[in-house]
Amino acid sequence: METDSSSSLIINPNTLNSKPTVIVIMGATGSGKSRLAIDLASQLQLQLPIEIINADSMQVYQGLDVLTNKVPLHDQKGVPHHLLGTISPEVEFTAKDFRDYAVPLINDITSRNHLPVIVGGTNYYIQALVSRFLLDESLGDTDDGCFDETKGDKEPHMQLMLDQENFSYSYESLKAIDPVAANRIHPNDHRKISQYLRLYTSCGGLPSKYLQEKTMENWGDGDNLRYNCCFICVDASLPVIDTYVDQRVDQMVNSGLLQEVYDIFNPDAVYTRGLRQAIGVREFEDFLKVYNCQELTITSIEKLKENMDTISCSSCENPLKQLLEDAIDKVKLNTRRLVRRQKRRLNRLQTLFGWNIHYVDATECLSCFTEESWTENVVKPSIQIIQSHFEKDTKCGFDARNVSNGVKLMERDLWTQHICKACGNKVLRGAYEWEQHKQGRSHRKRVCRLRKSGVSGLDG
């Protein structure tokens, strides 16, 4: 694969805008982000060596290589990869942890005059890294002097510290202390509940006050990022991605996904922590429970595959066959849902936070992949975007910051909680999410159906 698109490209990652320059490759799962990063490395290696930092929240963990779709060593083509399969699967690797690992990596890479390329679909990891303040992991960015203790917050804080041994880190406690902050998060989001309460006990001020007054002017704003970022999003139409995702799940099953899940299966496991959060683990729980009860001893992947083939070929009355098919369908469904969440998040980063994201269309490549199509539709446009970025050519692409119409972060409604009765009391955070939800097809259909049945008082 050859192209002269980068023949005139001259790059120095340390001089542009006095900030280290990083390339950020984003996009929904299955869109081809990792492949693009490796292809860019081979295209630009004579200009500037590339090193890849993985920004996928499940690929950072050791294990489940098939399920998490890690790039095999032989496909990495000698390009250095960081944070790929290096974290213990039992720990909770947060956005703050990712930032704390990635910042020194970027410093080291740029010090050697290499170009850091951040690759992944976990957009909150990327936002945590490039933003100057980490909104949802705020405790890690605070110190004892983060509040003015003369403003009356010290007394309840000290009383809480005295009672901390008996203090319950619950949603009810947060709601009693700071109902504004409680409105911003879901009652079952135990991680953020704990973070906000620890912020209160460590600094003595209301989390909502700190987050709104001290950090919103800096957090996530496209004009005030930690690095000089060139954002590239590998995009494709939803129907094509859906089909590709379904095919990829089937390929994963054939490549040993079930063996990986079987090896870490524990009926008493917690699925909200570490690697077990990955889509494709919990979905097989019901199947594996029944499977184990039948005392089918597995000694190798070949034996498991043989058993799966036997189950797949069995009659429809076989409960194991139905459980297996249901589990695979759940993996496909949950992956498709993830794709939609990722796309919504990317849209939000562009329209609400003003990120200048350049899109390259991989629809044709995913529907019928050829090297020629991939090079022409994805690789070459990406090289041109990078070249224009380093040349500071504002005519290339459009500036998404204009889309936000000068909206200031302080004016953005991120703290008002909206309840959609039509959709089963679904909780939406902020005016943006609420408006996006009301425009959704499912919501509009439910509202229409309920109104026809005589239900009144519905929004949207």
Image: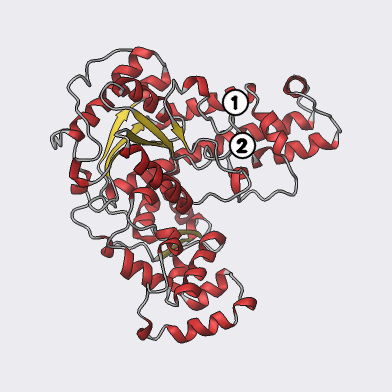
Q: Position of residue 173 (x, y in %)?
A: 56, 74
Q: Nearer the viewer, residue 10 or 330?
A: 10
Question: Is residue 23 visible in the rendered structure shown here?
Answer: no
Is the residue under label 2 in contact with that under label 1 (CB below 8 Å)?
A: yes
Query: Which amino acid type is marked by label 1?
Result: Met
Q: Please identify the quadrant where the C terminus is shown.
A: bottom left
Task: Count residues near mark 2 (Cα–Cα under 10 Å), then give few for <14, some for 14-19, many for 20+.
Answer: many
Residue depicted at x 51% and y 61%: 192
Secondary structure at badge 2 equals loop
| 24 left or right, relative to 452 | left
Residue depicted at x 19% and y 25%: 9
Question: Is 205 placed above or below 84 here?
Answer: below
Quadrant position of residue 32 = top left
Kindly identify which residue carries mark 1: 252
- Mark 1 and mark 2 lie on one chain; the one further toward the N terminus is 1
Q: CA distance from mark 1 to mark 2?
A: 10 Å
Secondary structure at badge 1 equals helix
| 96 left or right, relative to 363 | right
Question: Is 94 placed above or below 329 here?
Answer: below
Query: Which amino acid type is marked by label 2?
Result: Gly
| 186 left or right, relative to 277 | left
- Specify the color scheme: secondary structure
| 394 left or right, relative to 409 | left
Kindly identify which residue carries mark 2: 280
* Furthest residue toward right: 295
Q: Please identify the quadrant where the N terminus is shown.
A: top left
